[in-house]
Image (spheres, helix red, strand yellow):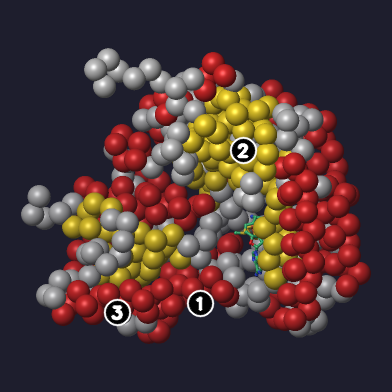
Amino acid sequence: MSNQRKVHVKSFGCQMNVYDSNRMADTLAPAGYVETATPEDADLVILNTCHIREKAVDKVYSEIGRIRMMKEEAAAQGRQMLIAVAGCVAQAEGQEIVRRAPAVDLVVGSQNYHRLPDMIARAREGECVVDTEFPLDDKFDALAVPKREQIAKRGLTAFVTVQEGCDKFCTFCVVPYTRGTEVSRPVEKIATEVARLAEAGVREVTLIGQNVNAYHGLDQSGSPASLGVLLRRLARIEGIARLRYTTSHPRDMDDELIAAHRELPELMPCVHLPVQSGSDRILDTMNRRHTIRHYLDIVARMRAARHDLAFTSDFIVGFPGETEDDFQDTLRLAETVGFAAAFTFAYSPRPGTPAAEMDGQVAEDVKIDRLHRLQALIAAQQRAFNASFVGLRLDVLLEKPGRLTGQLAGKSPYLQAVHVMGPAALLGQVVPVTVTHLGSNSLFGTLDPQRAAPELAPAGA
Ligand code: SAM
Ligand code: SF4
């Protein structure tokens, strides 16, 4: 095909960006763009960016510098390469990106991906195109749906955005500014998308949103449905073996969602519930709108609904005004809950957010020291959590061949990587695995002898 062009999309930051990157590639497919894994041979490089911490933004600018050199090389060979910046940095900085990095040809905000084909056509004519409006039309309706082969190529697991934006305005966070106000997609549109994924072989779907459990999309009768109701609807779709959701806010953990954990075997017993700090004083200045008592109460209610539930979390250390005592409260909270894993961050002041202007900014070396101490505790908790499965059986979704011949790699209900020896025919199935020992980043186990039997070689092979 002579008018075929290549697009390379690189995602930074959260899973929502991974989902958006796939949808951008799907939207460009009808315009003749095929995905390429490397930027060097691409006609269009899209950097789908993250603005959450300063380091994330710095990474984007250094990546633009690297791609600019490839663009210059391409031009020397008489080939046009366009550079597009998408995502939250695009949304937050808009025109400023082109001023700081003139090699960028187009800047597209997170709500405007469906306009990409038109923007690219203008950029190819030499126009510098910046579009970071929050339009009223539904971006999800306007984005192209992926083809069956495209879905199959992306594997057995998929993300589906069900909710975007945030109305919570935590004082440290840029999301309400870069992703806008909370919007939920209707139940049946999500169900149609998940059914299409299942039909193409996807077995596990993770519902994503900046505040996923604030989901309130309309059901068929036009009434708002909660995340618990949505999960019940999706659990009925044939082929979907596993459902997950992320990221939740403690304030929005309601009875319907807790009941879904009690009743739906498809809903995995692993909940990401960011707490940020173990100090009520700091939670208040963060505007988190929950207390530690409230958080522990949710954990207890959820564990009562499903005893094998594990929790993971996000923490910020060194928030303005955080004292050593506040930090000790954070360590205590982590010890009380016992997390399976956690993301830990040193507070990064973000321009335009209230916390960036607060008194009592914590010195960088103090932040780093606290970060290391918290990370050591979380790492010990994660090791203990993993070790607790040795000798037990875990259901594992086998996703791909492992590194060794005859080895298969998959995920446990708790997102632990698990390796077993077994026939490739089991790929795509959820099978019971007895955990035998721990590796540095994964679990190793064995299949039932019956399942582990090698495939019969075809006659004459
Ligand atoms: N909506 C989720 C919640 O309510 O916790 C969080 C979404 S945010 C994209 C992911 C994580 O980034 C947050 O939970 C927080 O721990 C971290 N984060 C956000 N802003 C930050 C900042 N200014 N400095 C350091 N970490 C930050
Ligand atoms: Fe950011 Fe999450 Fe707070 Fe919303 S709830 S402002 S996304 S940290």
Ligand 1 image-quadrant field: bottom right
Which residue is disc 1 drawn over?
58
Quick one: 240 or 90, which is closer to the camera? 240
Residue, disc 3: 69
Task: Determine crowd level at label 3: few under 14, some 14-19, many 20+ residues with C-alpha closer than 10 A.
Answer: few
- Badge 1 amino acid: Asp
The answer to whether 449 appears left or right of 296 in the picture is left
Q: Residue furthest right?
A: 325
Q: Residue at x 21, y 47 (%)?
A: 30
Quadrant of residue 374 within the rendered picture: bottom right
Q: Nearer the viewer, mark 1 or mark 3?
A: 3
**Residue labelled with disc 2:** 444
Q: Amino acid at mark 2?
A: Phe
Secondary element at image label 1: helix
Q: Which of the 4 image quadrants contains residue 276?
A: bottom right
Of 373 and 383, nearer the camera is: 383
Q: Do residues under tags 2 and 3 come within 8 Å of each other at their CB atoms? A: no
- Amino acid carrying label 3: it is Met
Whether ligand 1 has any atom under 8 Å from the Cβ at mark 3 is answered as: no
Tell me if residue 374 comes above or below residue 34 in the rendering. Answer: below
Residue 233's place in the image compared with 278, above or below, is above
